[in-house]
Amino acid sequence: MAQFTVVQEVDAPAEAVWATLVDWPRHGDWAPLTVVRRLPGPSEGAGAGFVARTGVGPLAFNDPMTVTAWQPPKDNRVARCEVVKSGRVVHGRAWFTVTPLPGDRCRVVWFEDVTVSPRALTRYAAPLLSVAGRLGFATTLRALARDVERATPATP
């Protein structure tokens, strides 16, 4: 399996960052060549489902996900969301946490543990897939942070 972790600090409250992260269709605003749509059913919480379509033309693939754990920020505790990826191309799991920090800031940690089909590709290319995933998600989380920071007024 290819694994990677990305950490991004954000100059915005955990609640604002969480709300942005779990607005699934907005992920397409930051992830290159990706469009995300919700699936029928709950839009948040365990059981919510969505599909990220990534790529161009015939090189695009669907990455369906279902939320399996959901703990929004409350009372200054760490928020956590976990998903299972069940696509034909990408399968595995991912999670992110949002940790409140002093001064209306927070830290986002994003983790992925995925297999890419054909499975032999992951077996031989796992280090490359991990580096590519880390670079791609670092770029995505930086773009998300810029959006949330612009939209969140600074507190005195």
Image (tube, rainbow, N blue to C red):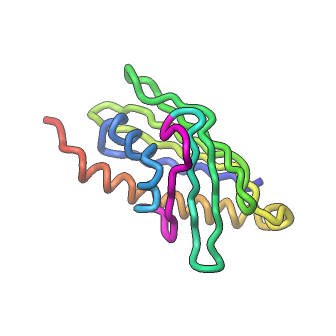
Spot occupied by residue 62 in the image (x, y as percentages of width and height): 64, 62
Query: Is residue 152 rendered to the left or right of residue 118?
Result: left
> Is 42 covered by the magenta stretch?
yes
In the picture as drawn, the residue positioned furthest to the right comes out as 120
Relative to 79, residue 56 above or below: below
Spot occupied by residue 131 in the image (x, y as percentages of width and height): 64, 63
Residue at (75% x, 60% y) in the render: 88
Number of numbered discs visible in the structure rendering: 0
In the picture as drawn, the residue positioned furthest to the top comes out as 75
Relative to 41, residue 132 above or below: below
| Residue span colored magenta | 30-44
In terms of depth relative to the viewer, which is nearer, 153 or 105? 153
In the picture as drawn, the residue positioned furthest to the left comes out as 156
In the picture as drawn, the residue positioned furthest to the bottom comes out as 57
Tell me where residue 53 sits by quadrant.
bottom right
Spot occupied by residue 104 in the image (x, y as percentages of width and height): 28, 35
Residue at (30% x, 44% y) in the render: 11
Spot occupied by residue 25 in the image (x, y as percentages of width and height): 45, 54
The kind of secondary structure the magenta stretch mainly shows is loop
- Locate the C terminus by quadrant: top left
Relative to 107, residue 124 above or below: below
Residue at (57% x, 77% y) in the render: 56
Tell me where residue 76 sits by quadrant.
top left
> Is 98 covered by the magenta stretch?
no
